[in-house]
Amino acid sequence: MKRLDGKTALVTGGTSGIGFGTAKRLQEEGAVVYITGRTQGRVDAAVERLAGSARGIAADATDREAMQAVVEAIEAERGTLDILFANAGAAWYGTIAEISEEDIDKGLALDLKGTIFTIQAALPLIPDGGAIVVNTSITQDMGLPTFGVYAAAKSGLRSLVRTLTNELRDRRIRVNAVSPGVILTEVFEKDMGPEAGAAYVERVVNEIPAGRIGLPEDIGNAVVYLASVEASFVNGAELTVDGGQTQLYAGRN
């Protein structure tokens, strides 16, 4: 028997990268998985790649009504939502002198507000004892230059996880965070470019005790654990999946 047999899961931002890798792992463990993405074409392509029982719905996580429609569609087809992976987000770069108002609005809207909208929409459909996993980031603890808006939004999500753990205690809904390190995704490769990306990977691997860069499936494995009965006594926690990178970083400060 698979760990998530009979469960229904929603992964926002599930068309590529961490979201897609996690959706794949949830599905492999027996869950019926719904994914969202901003465009129908990307959603359809991802669902085709996942095959099996995967479903896809085009929706912008920053649109409260769109996320409500996603949940209503899941309710009509499945009647319940056992697992939510609030993953949709994007990184925005710039030093404090460079950050524009548009950068702030976009960054906080997608990474923070969108997650709140998603959880608000999903909560009525999540049964008592369900599981919510929020995607944070190791950048919130590292003070990396140019990551100010992104790290601030992710720090806000870490705080939100603690608050929700308390607010949802009567329903025994577990709320945890997964904090990815450097993960090789399509966006990573696109942002860096092939040559710069390869040079960066070579450098950063030396900072990772595991000796390699992370893969989307590594985050998927963590989410499967946090969503499963094996983590029934894990609540309000943040599971860092970075190959040990931040442990070395912390030791230097």
Image (cartoon, grey):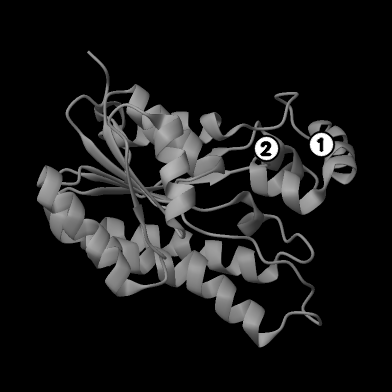
Q: Amino acid at mark 1?
A: Val
Corner quadrant of residue 149: bottom right
Total numbered badges shown on the rendered structure: 2
Label 1 to label 2, Cα distance in Å?
Answer: 9 Å
Q: Is residue 114 visible?
A: yes
Q: Nearer the viewer, residue 109 or 75?
A: 75
Q: Quadrant of the N terminus?
A: top left
- Measured from the top left, where is residue 253 in percent x and y? 78, 51
Residue that extends furthest to the top in the rendered view of this protein? 1
Which residue lies at the image location 24% right of the left edge and 29% below the top edge?
A: 229
Q: Residue at horizontal 13%, vertical 52%? A: 75
Near mark 1 (Cα within 10 A), the count class, few <14, some 14-19 or many ≥20, is some
Callouts 1 and 2 close, C-beta under 8 Å: yes
**SS under mark 1:** helix
Query: Which residue is at 26% across, 58% downward?
Result: 70
Q: Which residue is mark 1?
A: 201
Quick check: can you spot residue 128?
Answer: no
Alpha-carbon neighbours of circle 2 within 10 Å: few (<14), some, or many (≥20)? some
Q: Nearer the viewer, residue 240 or 252?
A: 240
Q: From the top left corner, tell me how far across and down residue 118 is, in percent.
A: 33, 62
Q: Is residue 197 left or right of residue 178?
A: right
- Considering only order in the chain, which callout, 2 or 1, is on the residue closer to the N terminus? 2
Vertical order, 176 against 62 (above or below) = above
Quadrant in the picture for residue 90: bottom right
Residue occupying image coordinates x 75% and y 53% = 191
Q: x and y percent of residue 16 in the render?
A: 53, 43
Which disc is residue 98 wearing?
none
**Farthest bottom residue?**
101
Q: Which residue is mark 2?
A: 184
Task: Between residue 43 and residue 17, name the one nearer to us.
Answer: 43
